[in-house]
Amino acid sequence: MKKLILLMVCTLIAACDQSTKRMSDMPAQAMDAPENIQRISGIDLEGMNADIRPQDDFYEYANGKWIAATEIPAEEIGWGSYMTLRKASLEQSKAIVEGLAESAGLEGEEKKISDFYKAWMDEALVNEKGAEPLAMNLKKIEALTSHDDIISYFGSENPNGLDGPFNFYVGQDDKDSTRYIVFFVQSGLG
């Protein structure tokens, strides 16, 4: 036990050694940053309205110029950096998939993606088949006569990608992050 205490004391003394240089001891030129480095904070200051005092209306102060200068596209419900990134990502994904669809001699996953895309884009075939591919599902729906039938139908079709008006998923508990729980939520109609 005495050896352990002695070892700890020696370690503490060694840790307190001041043999390393302090910043104030270093020459001034070593501390100066080169003039050609541009410092960027990551905050877009151009969208801020400095005419408004932050304590009066922080929202207008932080976003005023951006709101005044930005028009939400008619086909969108909102607009901002995330929407811009999402749109760019979708355009890149579309270009990749269309490139695969135009390529020949594909194998594996690339061929699956190409075939899937071509099947969806073949409007002539889709129009020719009409509602025929849905006939089996429509017959099942027509046969539903009770609440229990509807519940069974939603349950049996859920693995096929059909969401009923309610859905569930497993996620992290909001009140105890060490647990996972089942969430039961409204999902929409179909």
Image (tube, rainbow, N blue to C red):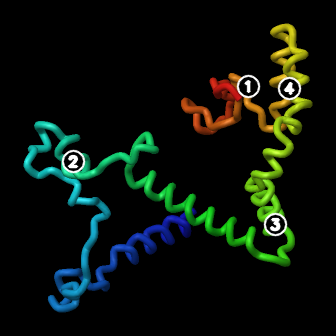
Question: Mark 3 vs mark 2: which is more N-terminal?
Answer: 2
Q: Amino acid at mark 2?
A: Ala
Q: Of marks 2 and 4, which one's residue comes earlier in the chain?
A: 2
Quarter containing the N terminus: bottom right
Relative to 146, 185 lies left or right: left
Q: How many marks overall?
A: 4
Q: Residues within 10 Å of mark 1 (few under 14, many from 20)?
A: some
Q: Which residue is mark 2?
A: 68
- The answer for how far apart the CA atoms under marks 3 and 1 are is 30 Å
Q: Name the residue at 80% across, 55% down.
A: 119
2 or 4: mark nearer the eye:
4
Mark 4 is on which residue type?
Leu
Query: Spatial distance from mark 2 to mark 1, Cα to Cα?
Result: 41 Å
Q: Residue at 63% of width from left, 24% of height from top?
A: 186
N-terminal-most mark, 3 or 1: 3
Q: Earlier in the sequence, mark 2 or mark 1?
A: 2
Q: Is residue 123 above or below residue 8?
A: above
**C-alpha distance separating marks 4 and 3:** 32 Å
Kindly indicate whether the residue at mark 1 contacts the one at mark 2 (C-beta within 8 angstroms). no
Q: Which residue is mark 3?
A: 109
Q: Which residue is mark 4?
A: 138
